[in-house]
Image (cartoon, grey):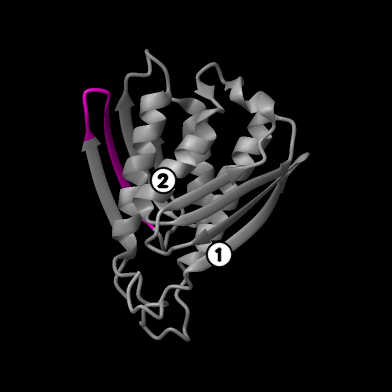
């Protein structure tokens, strides 16, 4: 099987972002967004997904992190979709419950070609939290919703409980990565077929 690698680039007046992802790994990373906590989350996403990931992002972080985080989600989603191509042979579905200390997060994914995101359960105080002086946790939902739309995923993320904004956010990134890791695996029973009665995803 040829390497499943996707690249995408997006340049606007607010950001200049390039992403390369190898969904088959190895999970080596080269990530620079100018936002240290966001780099940490993208690194966790790559490591726990088993993905090779390169992200080079320059954005108007002097305004705030919003545009850089949002546009990185767009570019990452597009690159992810390109890496999977026609999705022949993939397992398609994946799920993961993931604890991080006091937090428990569940992610369920269908690489369906039908973009949809349901994001539930974060405690209300995450609307107001800033991590590391630059990352607003209110962006968590927006990141995953944007990523799902551009990757063509049906994605459900639920925080069952948690208190620490860092733990909740990191558990979300890791849970989604682990669910995707399962979903992109090649299923020997599919034998190169597309896993849908429609014949296309």
- The stretch of residues the image draws in magenta is 11-22
Task: Give the x, y percent position of residue 201.
Answer: 35, 69
Q: Quadrant of residue 68?
A: top left
Q: Nearer the viewer, residue 40 or 161?
A: 161
Residue at 56% from the left image edge and 52% from the top image edge:
156
| Residue annotated with mark 2 | 147
User: Label 1 to label 2, Cα distance in Å?
Assistant: 16 Å
Task: Give the x, y percent position of residue 16.
Answer: 25, 30
Task: Give the x, y percent position of residue 34.
Answer: 40, 24
Tell me the SS state at disc 2. Answer: helix
Q: Is residue 48 visible?
A: no
Q: Quadrant of residue 192?
A: bottom left
Residue at 37% from the left image edge and 62% from the top image edge:
113
User: Does residue 146 lie above or below 98 as drawn?
Assistant: above
Q: Is residue 78 visible?
A: yes
Magenta-span inclusion, residue 19? yes
Q: Earlier in the sequence, mark 1 or mark 2?
A: 1
Magenta-span inclusion, residue 142? no
Asked if labels 2 and 1 touch by Cβ distance under 8 angstroms, the answer is no
Tell me the SS state at disc 1. Answer: strand
Quadrant location of the N terminus?
A: bottom left
| Residue annotated with mark 1 | 94
Residue at 41% from the left image edge and 25% from the top image edge:
66
């Amino acid at each position: 099987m040829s390497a499943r690698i996707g690249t995408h680039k997006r340049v606007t007046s607010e950001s200049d972002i390039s992403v390369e992802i190898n969904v088959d790994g190895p999970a080596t990373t080269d990530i620079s967004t100018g936002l240290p906590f966001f780099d940490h989350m993208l690194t966790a996403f790559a490591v726990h997904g088993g993905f090779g990931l390169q992200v080079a992002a320059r954005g108007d972080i002097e305004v705030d992190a919003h545009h850089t985080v949002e546009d990185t989600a767009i570019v990452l989603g597009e690159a992810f979709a390109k890496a999977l191509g026609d999705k022949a042979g993939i397992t398609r579905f994946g799920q993961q419950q993931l604890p991080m200390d006091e937090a428990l997060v569940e992610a369920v994914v269908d690489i369906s070609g039908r973009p949809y995101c349901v994001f539930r359960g974060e405690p209300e105080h995450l609307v107001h939290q800033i991590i590391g002086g630059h990352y607003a946790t209110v962006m968590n939902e927006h990141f995953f919703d944007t990523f799902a739309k551009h990757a063509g995923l049906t994605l459900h993320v639920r925080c069952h409980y948690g208190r620490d904004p860092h733990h909740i956010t990191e558990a979300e990134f890791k849970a989604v990565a682990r669910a995707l890791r399962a979903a992109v695996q090649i299923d020997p029973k599919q034998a190169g077929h597309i896993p849908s009665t429609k014949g296309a995803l």
